[in-house]
Image (cartoon, rainbow, N blue to C red):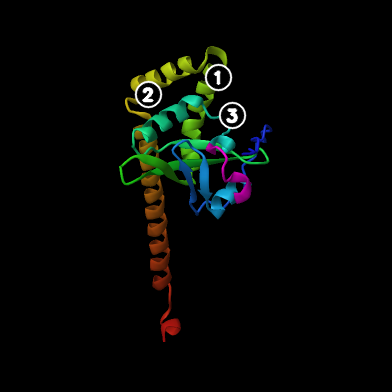
Amino acid sequence: MNHIPPTQQTVNEEVQWNKEKTIVSKTDAFGTILYVNDVFCEASEYSKVELIGEPHNIIRHPDMPKVAFKVLWKALKDGKNFHAIVKNRTKSGKYYWVITDFIIDRNEKNEITGYTGRRKAVPNSVIEKIEPIYKTLVEIEKLKGEKASELYFNAYLNEEIGKSYDEFVLDLFEEEVAKQKKRNAIAKRENIFKKGLNWFFVTEYEMS
């Protein structure tokens, strides 16, 4: 099979895509792409013809630490869903951030045959918290190697977070959801308050 080499250029610009939609892909047990939806193509800037048969890491961004994918793949091979925050690289070298969610595909013998991945856009507040951690891990990988990066990552999660990576990611999103609910509640109260003042200032003439 002729493979498309992943782009080598990196552009510090976020690609434009519909962040309200869900990116979907299916791979075999080895990560070879079997299916992608239109949203995947929109975000990655690759066509379906280009993507089918390619390893999923064709969209891997150099800003992503390898240890993050090591943890992700270990969970998937163990048959567990895994939520990871991932920065991907498009065909033109731009980037987009997503959070992952997986369905483990199995055959009649309960053997893992592949993975269905669903991905959604990540709020900026979450990116701001995870990006510095990834940057440190990538720098350690470059200077000291992957093993050193993995050791630091585990120590960081244990000493500073007190949770696994998956739990840490879930907490980041729960915090964001709580903040969003609070913002929505404030906006709703303000809207009700404005409506309340409107009826108060309506004159008898306007009401008749």
Q: Give the range drawn in magenta.
A: 46-56
Question: Which residue reaches farthest top?
Answer: 144
In the rendered image, residue 50 lying in the magenta stretch gets the answer yes
Q: Which mark is residue 157?
A: 2
In what quadrant of the picture does the C terminus appear? bottom left
In the rendered image, residue 123 lying in the magenta stretch gets the answer no
- Which mark's residue is nearer the viewer, 1 or 3? 3
Q: Residues within 10 Å of mark 2 (few under 14, many from 20)?
A: some
Secondary structure of residue under mark 1: helix
At x 49%, y 18%, the residue is 146
**In the displayed structure, would residue 188 be above or below residue 125?**
below
Mark 1: amino acid = Glu
Q: Disc 2 to disc 3, how far (Cα)?
A: 22 Å
Which residue is identified by label 3? 62
**In the displayed structure, would residue 9 be above or below residue 36?**
above
Secondary structure of residue under mark 2: helix
**In the displayed structure, would residue 7 be above or below residue 118?**
above
Tell which circle, 2 or 3, labels the residue nearer the N-terminal end.
Answer: 3
Q: Nearer the viewer, residue 18 or 128?
A: 18
User: Left of 124 or right of it: where is 182?
Assistant: left
Q: Residue 139 carries which label?
A: 1
Tell which circle, 1 or 2, labels the residue nearer the N-terminal end.
Answer: 1
**In the displayed structure, would residue 138 be above or below residue 103?**
above
> Residue 89: horizontal and vertical position, in percent?
60, 38
